[in-house]
Structure formats: C-alpha cells, structure tokens
Image (cartoon, rainbow, N blue to C red):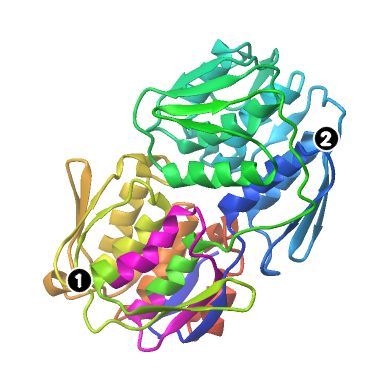
Amino acid sequence: MNVRLSPASLCGTVHSIASKSDVHRLLFCAAQADGPVTIEMNDRSPLSDDILTTAEVIRGLGADVREEPGRFTVTPSNVTPKAPTFDCRESGSTLRFLLPVAAARCDEPSFNGSGRLPDRPVGELLDVLKARGVEVSGDRLPFSFQGRLQSGTFELPGNVSSQYITGLLLALPALDGDSEIRLTTPLQSASYVNITLHALSRFGIRTSVLPRGFLVPGGQPFRSPGTILADGDWSNAGYFFAAGALGKDPVSVSGLSPDSPQGDKVLAGILKDRMGAPVSKVRQEDGTYTYTVTPAETLSASDLDVHDIPDAFPVLAVLAAFAKGRTRFTGCERLRFKESDRIASVIAMLEALGGKAMEDGADIIVCGADETGGLTGGTVQSCGDHRIVMAAAVAALRCTGDVTVTGAEAVRKSYPSFFEEYTALGGIAHVI
C-alpha cells in the first residue's frame, strides 16, 4: 500500500492505544498463570500484527486465548505441548520472548518467521540456552530445540538486545532452581527490562536486581491477577506529540501514565525542556493523564541520547529536521537491528524529503531547517518499518509539498488505526 500525504495541521485529542511492549509481556505471563487472566486495554482499536502474533504463539504454549474488542482473556493449560511449531512472523519481540519460555516448557519446539526476522540477531540468546541444556538445530530461522532449559547462570551481553533478558526473565521463574542473569556489558534499553519486571511483579514473581544482572528464584508460580489493565502506549503517542509541536494547533493524547516504566515517556520532557515545545498535562478521573503539545514558535536543536528510546529516534529525527541548529543523536548502535536498519532508513527518509543527515562515527547528525530550509516533500521508502511510515506522515504535515510513502501497510505492525486517527485530526492521506 502506498499513501500520499499533503501538508496539513492536526488538531484535537487522540486516545492512546495499549502499549505493545506491555501487552506482549502480559500475554506471556498470562499463558503461564495458575488461572484465567483478562487483559484489559484502554481502547478498542484493531490489534497490531505483532500482538496478534504473540497471541497465536501462546496458543502454541497450550493457552486458550479469546480476543474481544479492548481485551484478551487467556486461560492457561497444564498440558506440556509436544513438538509445537511457532510462527513468529515478523515480530522480533515475540521470537526473543518465546525462545526461553518454549525451552523451559515445551518438548521439541520448532520456530520460523518471515520478512526481516530471520536476519535479526538471536545468536547470543541461543548460546546461553545451549549452555543450559538446550540443543539447537541451527543459528538462523527456521530451527528447532531438543532438551529442556536448566536453571543456573546465564551470561550474555547487555548491549545487544534487552529482549534477550526479557525472554529469560519470563522463563526462569518456572525452573526448579534459582538462576542468575549475568551481564558482561552494560545494559542498554533498560526501560524495556523495567517493563518486564513490572509485568512479572503483577503476577507475583519475585526478582532481584544485581549490580550487573538479575537473580530469579526458581519454582515460582505465576499468580493470576484476575483482570489486569495494560499501559497506554507512550511510543506511538510520540508521533502525535510531534504533530502538535510542528503544526498550527494543539494536539492531545489521553490515557497515559507518568508512572509507566516505558522509556518513551521521556518524549514529553524532550519536547518541553530540550526542544522548546510547550507541553501540559491534566489528570483524568480514571487516574491517567491527557498530555497536550502546543506548537513551538521555534524548535531548538539538542544532543539526544537514544540508546534507551530506539523506537523514538525516527520521529525525533523529523523534529530535528525542522529545528534551529544541528541535532546530534548518540547511543545509536542498536538502531541497525530494528525492523529496518534504522540508521540507513532514517537518513534516507530525511534526504528523500529534502533534508540532510549523516553519520559521524557512532553518532548521527541531523541538520536543522536554518541550514536546509526545511523539508520539501518527496517519496519515502518504508523499508518495512512501521516507525518510518509514521515519522514520514508527521514530516508531511510541515513539508512544502506532498509526501508519498511506499509500503505504508507496515503500520499494522504496531498501530493499525494510525492513519484513521491521523485523518480524524485533520491529516490528509490518500491511498494510491
């Protein structure tokens, strides 16, 4: 699907969708619980492809999963799955969370995937599973396991993927003995691990944070909380925050919690304190907050570290292209291993729209509008990356000409209703 977008200004309020990061983890916890679990989501938007993939793989773990608008009901099973085949499609989170859980709970599981997933790294995770009793048929999808995961010490780098650590944290409580996750390098994207620890605590799982890792006591049952509410999604809210900063009218996002463990909640502070866009918040009766971003007279360039917020980088790069001055992004190492090589795809997006960005060693520099004249429009290749699609749509609001995005169906990966919300607030988008 190709979409043509025209300059416009968004105005109004969008309700945040449920956090993909939170729902992934809650589904895996629910599949291992000692009773049924209802996961309530704060909206009735269509479910993303990645979440539907996780729902399907936990069915492979033996759980009964019922989908209704705005909720999942998961009934776990005590039956050990025999030789299940798990299709993780294009979801890196699903695969990396699943591998340790399946190794702990299944006999002879097999795994496959599609799109870019077979090329995304899992080697270090497979190595620690091999060291603790699991035989792996290959180092690239598709592959299968023999043997069950054993408790003990799991040593792996912390700067490759926090999803490896999440997968282990989701699996280790069910093992017979205590386990330690020992990190050989500093942890990056720590906020994603914090989301995992928060989800585990809601199911009664105890963990201890160590100076370089985590201690997970074995033999712990996942206690069903009955009904549990998923967090609102700060990552996808950021695209509408950016639309408010770049437009002519305020844009609000409701259903967000300032106490969320999601790292992308810092976006509101970056806009307000680092880039100069007015941001306000109002508490609602249900305890969540509505955040409103008012157009900035001038956006300021800043040095921004994205090592803990890799999903925010594309939209921050768009904001930087309209700012005054050059913005330097640090902590970019893991961006190459997302749905696209996000360093290459973001630079290509900005250059296709008339902007200028370049690599400077391990950093990325985006030139501001005072140097380039701003973005003019053009054709952006999505590279199969949902966040490139949404970032390009935000850029189109302020471009001087139309923007065409190829492969725009990639938004289904995390935000299927994005263009519906975008046009409802005044955006101009046509499928061509």
Mark 1 is on which residue type?
Ser
Q: Residues within 10 Å of mark 1 (few under 14, many from 20)?
A: many
Question: Which residue is identified by label 2?
Answer: 62
Which sits in the foreground, 135 or 407?
135
Task: Identify the residue at horizontal 66%, vertical 28% (top origin).
Answer: 173
Residue 102 visible in the picture: yes
Q: Secondary structure at mark 1?
A: loop
Question: Which residue is identified by label 1?
Answer: 300
Residue 353 visible in the picture: no
In the image, which residues are magenta? 243-272
Task: Identify the residue at horizontal 78%, vertical 35% (top origin).
Answer: 60
Which sits in the foreground, 322 or 61?
61
Q: Position of residue 112 (x, y in %)?
A: 64, 32
Which sits in the foreground, 203 or 67?
203
Choose the circle earlier in sequence order: 1 or 2. 2
The Cα atoms of the two marked residues, 1 and 2, are separated by 52 Å
Task: Identify the residue at horizontal 58%, vertical 20% (top origin).
Answer: 179
Q: Position of residue 68 (x, y in %)?
A: 80, 62
Mark 2 is on which residue type?
Gly
Task: Identify the residue at horizontal 31%, vertical 73% (top origin).
Answer: 377
Q: Does residue 87 appear to the left or right of 279 in the view shown?
A: right
Above or below — where is 278 with respect to 418? below
Q: Position of residue 128 (x, y in %)?
A: 52, 18
Residue 21: within the magenta?
no
